[in-house]
Image (cartoon, coloured by chain):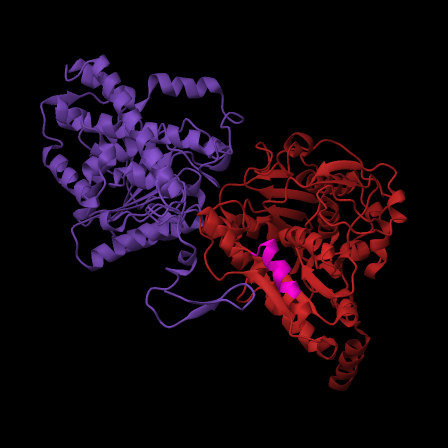
Chain colours: A purple, B red
């Protein structure tokens, strides 16, 4: 049981994350535990979809529970830190949507590329980022994944092929298509997952990118995190067609229950096979929900009712779903899980405290990383008296 | 036949008036008394109202005379100056409000006055605007006049331009100025250049507004200063507001203008408080604002940097310097009249801006001053601008990116000691 309750927060090195991933990849999917699908898949332009008989095993279930609980606690801690002004600027929280990175990463490897928008804390953790790195970046410390220069919306992890973290809505479409283009060009047996939201689905650049992906049969999975609200605007007020998986008649799509990690995993597995078979891009729409508002400056209750939020929490919470299966299969009792959750919470608090004590960036880091090579360029201070060599 | 045509063409060319950049504010607005709700197409979700020709639609006076109407008393004013405040008694009370409320008031008054004024943008309707500038508009004016658009900046800006071509006066809100980069093509080609390329047939009386500038740790993509990117697009006018008084005035003037105007607001100035007049007023779009007269040095600034300059001026005045502070307000075109008069008086110029050094407003302003007033300058024009770096998220680094008051003080001291 000790291995199962080991918390994820201590993963300090990317190599450790890769090792964990390889270990989990080898055991995922094979299992004796059958999972019942709560909501069926809806297909567009596909004769057959992902398998509806999902199997899992003890390790995978516990890993999902651990990862999702870590993410949930990290987001709640970030909420607290924002309110006490340790995190500034914009902070878009991911709690409620944990099933998506959990399920998606179970079907991918770190050789596959992932790119997302500004609600990226969850995807970053799924890609092997650590809670410490996230908190450091959110608090602007040098130990952050972008050295404190990016902030909440710009989390990156190149060694695990996580390409961010973007502030402008819709950016992930063209960028993801480009990542897939690079993968195909270099003949790698990998896919790209380009994640965007229901609000972003009305961006022109997405249609342009999807057209090109379909034209050149690029291995890109467009994953729509449909949480039904684009900041304050409900999906039916922003989109003529409120489904996102069947928008184009030349790109197939699957609609998936995004609060169920297993459905997401099955869909992404299916989509990965689809892309690697050379059939071109595919869209996965994950029907999910965010408990917090759009960001910390949005209460999230002016455009949706508290009843709605409560209903989602009670009936479709992703962590509850996995916990129920764990309890039912007798892998761990409710008390064990509660204890594990408490350990994770304590660990997350420790990581936050460690991040708070981490050093701020030095002043001369203002000018580093503007260009790649030392080309001998200089820049001047604001009154032209201070001369700085660009690194 | 050809000869008569030739003569006709020549006479037309001679008779055509040379139109300077004088089409601003109410000067060229249509007489609104001619409009009545009966002649407008029925808008289904609109409350019924009548358009009154307001008594206050006199053309705004040009030049500095409009400054004499009101000397604002800013609550956050950091400068202890003696104000020739005979005019402030003209304020029989006035009312106090925050800058975003002033913008809202200006927008609301213009929407009441002219039924063709519409607002469009992301979350401007039911949500009330991400900075509450359009709060209550959807309830008051309906969903069509406070239009919630999908997240498609390029397209809804283009849509607004198209609507403007048919006679509407759209006010486009970019939730953050940085998002308008996606709409750059529409703003540059269609909004700015169309009046010229169509030979004067189409006017685009739209206002593009939104918060920009460096905020509190908003990250690189949300801390952009688009005034430097748009400044060379011909056909656009750009203004930057910095106080509730000029925010409301510029908003109203921009809406009444027949030209496309970009109104730059600053994300950190929305909660600035001031008492503004009750009566209807506008600020001239091409005019700079004399914030503090002086004689030692001319400090030219705009938007948030005005408040930093005022903060620095407090120290400078106590040290015995007498800076003349001008809020240039009009970023395109520059008010060379006010600026020139000041340069002729003080002979030294310092520009304090939030733009990046390369290609910023300060760069153009320096060139303009040097070209026109070189003989009046006793020293090279100083310019303090932001560093040429993407704005980092980290707080201390972000502070280093932007000009700080102590840097303004030391720059002025250096310039005046040479």
- Asked if residue A44 lies left or right of residue A15, the reply is right
> Horizontal and vertical percent for residue A238?
49, 37
Stretch in magenta: B403-413
- Asked if residue B224 lies left or right of residue B10, the reply is left
Residue at (18% x, 24% y) in the render: A5
Quarter of the figure with residue A309: top left
Q: Residue furthest bottom?
A: B3
Q: Residue furthest front?
A: B319
In the rendered view, would you say B257 is above or below B363?
above
> Horizontal and vertical percent for residue A36?
20, 20
In the rendered view, would you say A78 is above or below B399?
above
Query: Magenta includes B405?
Result: yes
Q: Is residue B392 visible?
A: yes
> Horizontal and vertical percent for residue B14?
80, 78
Q: Nearer the viewer, residue B146 or B418?
A: B418
In the rendered view, would you say A123 is above or below B328?
above
- Tell me the quarter of the image containing the C terminus of chain B: bottom right
Magenta segment's dominant SS is helix
Quarter of the figure with residue A271: top left
Quarter of the figure with residue B130: top right
Residue at (44% x, 43% y) in the render: A202
Q: Is residue A55 visible?
A: no
- Tell me the quarter of the image containing the N terminus of chain B: bottom right
Q: Nearer the viewer, residue B336 or A220?
A: B336
């Amino acid at each position: 049981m000790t291995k199962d309750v080991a918390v994820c927060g201590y993963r300090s090195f990317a190599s450790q994350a890769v090792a964990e991933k390889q270990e989990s990849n080898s055991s995922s999917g094979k299992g004796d535990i059958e999972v019942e699908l709560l909501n069926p898949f809806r297909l567009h332009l596909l004769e057959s979809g992902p398998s509806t008989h999902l199997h899992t095993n003890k390790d995978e279930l516990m890993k999902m529970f651990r990862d999702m609980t870590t993410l949930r606690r990290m987001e709640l801690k970030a909420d607290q830190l924002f309110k006490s002004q340790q995190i500034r600027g914009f902070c878009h929280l991911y709690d409620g949507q944990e099933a998506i990175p959990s399920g998606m990463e179970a079907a991918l490897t770190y050789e596959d590329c992932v790119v997302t928008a500004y609600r990226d804390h969850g995807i970053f953790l799924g890609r092997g980022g650590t809670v410490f790195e996230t908190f450091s970046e959110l608090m602007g410390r040098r130990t952050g994944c972008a050295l404190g220069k990016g902030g909440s919306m710009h989390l990156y992890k190149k060694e695990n092929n996580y390409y961010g973290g973007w502030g402008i809505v819709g950016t992930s479409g063209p960028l993801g298509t480009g990542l897939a283009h690079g993968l195909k060009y270099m003949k790698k047996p990998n896919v790209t997952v380009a994640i965007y939201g229901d609000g972003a689905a009305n961006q022109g650049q997405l249609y342009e990118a999807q057209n090109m992906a379909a034209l050149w049969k690029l291995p890109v999975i467009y994953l729509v995190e449909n949480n039904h609200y684009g900041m304050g605007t409900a999906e039916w007020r922003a989109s003529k067609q409120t489904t996102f998986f069947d928008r184009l008649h030349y790109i197939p799509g699957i609609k998936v229950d995004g609060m169920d990690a297993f459905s997401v995993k099955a869909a992404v597995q299916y989509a990965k096979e689809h892309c690697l078979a050379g059939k071109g891009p595919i869209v996965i729409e994950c029907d999910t929900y965010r408990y917090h508002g759009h960001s910390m400056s949005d209460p999230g209750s002016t455009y949706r009712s508290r009843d709605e939020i409560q209903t989602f929490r009670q009936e479709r919470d992703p962590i509850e779903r996995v916990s129920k299966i764990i309890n039912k299969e007798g892998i761990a009792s409710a008390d064990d899980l509660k204890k594990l959750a408490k350990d994770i919470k304590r660990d997350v608090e420790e990581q936050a405290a460690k991040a708070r004590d981490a050093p701020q960036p030095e002043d001369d880091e203002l000018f580093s990383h503007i260009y790649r090579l030392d080309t001998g360029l200089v820049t001047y201070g604001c009154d032209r008296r201070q001369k700085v060599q660009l690194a | 036949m050809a000869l008569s045509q030739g003569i006709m063409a020549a006479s037309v060319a001679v008779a055509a008036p040379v139109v300077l950049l004088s089409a601003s504010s109410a000067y060229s607005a249509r007489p609104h008394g001619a409009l009545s709700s009966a002649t407008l197409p029925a808008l289904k979700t609109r409350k019924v109202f009548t358009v009154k020709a307001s008594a206050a639609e006199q053309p705004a006076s040009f030049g500095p005379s409009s400054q004499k109407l009101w000397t604002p008393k800013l609550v956050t004013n950091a400068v202890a100056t003696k104000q020739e405040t005979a005019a402030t008694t003209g304020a029989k009370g006035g009312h106090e409000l925050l800058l975003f409320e002033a913008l809202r008031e200006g927008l609301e008054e213009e929407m009441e006055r002219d039924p063709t004024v519409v607002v469009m943008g992301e979350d401007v309707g039911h949500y009330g605007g991400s900075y509450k500038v359009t709060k209550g508009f959807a309830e008051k004016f309906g969903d069509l006049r406070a239009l919630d658009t999908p997240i498609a900046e390029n397209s809804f800006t283009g849509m607004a331009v198209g609507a403007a071509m048919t006679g509407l006066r759209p006010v486009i809100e970019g939730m953050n100025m940085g998002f308008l980069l996606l709409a750059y093509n529409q703003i540059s080609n269609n909004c700015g250049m169309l009046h010229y390329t169509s030979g004067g047939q189409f006017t685009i009386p739209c206002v593009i507004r939104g918060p920009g500038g460096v905020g509190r740790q908003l990250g690189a993509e949300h801390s952009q200063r688009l005034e430097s990117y748009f400044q060379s697009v011909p056909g656009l006018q750009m203004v930057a507001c910095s106080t509730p008084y000029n925010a409301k005035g510029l908003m109203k003037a921009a809406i009444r203008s027949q030209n496309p105007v970009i109104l730059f607001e600053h994300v950190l100035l929305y909660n600035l408080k001031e008492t503004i007049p009750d009566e209807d007023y506008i600020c001239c779009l091409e005019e700079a604002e004399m914030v503090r007269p002086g004689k030692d040095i001319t400090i030219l600034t705009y938007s948030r940097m005005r408040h930093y300059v005022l903060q620095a001026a407090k120290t400078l005045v106590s040290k015995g310097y007498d800076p003349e502070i001008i809020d240039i307000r009009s970023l395109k075109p520059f008010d060379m009249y006010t600026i020139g008069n000041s340069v002729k008086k003080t002979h030294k110029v310092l520009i304090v801006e939030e733009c990046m050094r390369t290609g910023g407003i300060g760069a153009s302003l320096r060139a303009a001053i040097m070209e026109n007033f070189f003989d009046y300058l006793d020293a090279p024009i100083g310019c303090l601008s932001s560093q040429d770096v993407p704005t980092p998220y980290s707080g201390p680094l972000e502070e280093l990116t932007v000009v700080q008051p102590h840097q303004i003080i030391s720059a002025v001291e250096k310039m005046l000691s040479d």
